[in-house]
Image (cartoon, coloured by chain):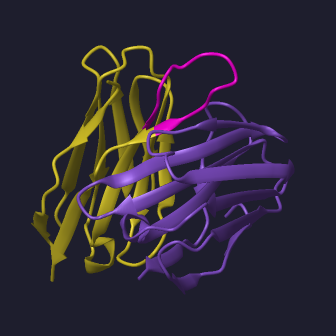
Chain colours: A yellow, B purple
Amino acid sequence: QKEVEQNSGPLSVPEGAIASLNCTYSDRGSQSFFWYRQYSGKSPELIMSIYSNGDKEDGRFTAQLNKASQYVSLLIRDSQPSDSATYLCAVNMNYGGATNKLIFGTGTLLAVQP
Amino acid sequence: DAGITQSPRHKVTETGTPVTLRCHQTENHRYMYWYRQDPGHGLRLIHYSYGVKDTDKGEVSDGYSVSRSKTEDFLLTLESATSSQTSVYFCASLLERGGEQYFGPGTRLTVT
């Protein structure tokens, strides 16, 4: 079973702090990794993609990938109440051929306290 | 934003009736997907398409069928709706294999 696992939370952090969200995946051959943010009642919104080991920064967001340990993380610096949402980790598993499927974790609920 | 729309956005239907949900994208994306999202289960793939007339099953495909006659449209049909199919349905698309997938606004379906 190819899986993506996340802690469901809630993860509560004070405003201005760093929020750290983690995700592990089972398929060692996975090549593409994504973080989505989903506000209650809304559709998932892509916020970060990462394809190679190391860090990728975009504004207050940093995605980190470690393929050897099969984990990907998302750091949110200077957390704001508007960052309160569910964060979904998604991994493009290696199915071969024309197949292209993302496997999603169940998400981590982040609550930023003012 | 990949210019993905879904219709209808909300629907209430009765058990046993057929229902068709439509997904339309304007980005000429090759791949299109239908997911359902339920509390405690996250996003689950129902069916996907990797080209016109090319479709395949996802992990929760029973009771659903799809069709893709044009690049821009991907239809999801519930052949005979059941209460267990009450859910929020999301369509998504992406241009190339391994790339970024974008979601539509969702359809909230209630089967009574």
Q: Which region is colored magenta?
A: A91-102
Q: Is residue B56 left or right of residue A90?
A: right
Q: Position of residue A77 (x, y in %)?
A: 28, 58
Q: Is residue B54 left or right of residue B43?
A: right
Q: Identify the residue at image location x=60%, y=48%.
A: B101
User: Predominant secondary structure in magenta?
Assistant: loop
Q: Identify the residue at image location x=54%, y=63%.
A: B90
Say if B48 sits above or below B7 in the image: above
Q: Identify the residue at image location x=16%, y=48%.
A: A7
Say if A64 sits above or below A26 in the image: below
- Work out whether residue B47 or residue B1 is closer to the camera in this orientation and state it: B47
Q: Identify the residue at image location x=47%, y=24%.
A: A52
- Work out whether residue A15 or residue A50 is closer to the camera in this orientation and state it: A50
Q: Position of residue A1 (x, y in %)?
A: 32, 24
Q: Position of residue A44 (x, y in %)?
A: 47, 62
Say if B91 sits above or below A40 in the image: above
Q: Is residue A98 magenta?
A: yes
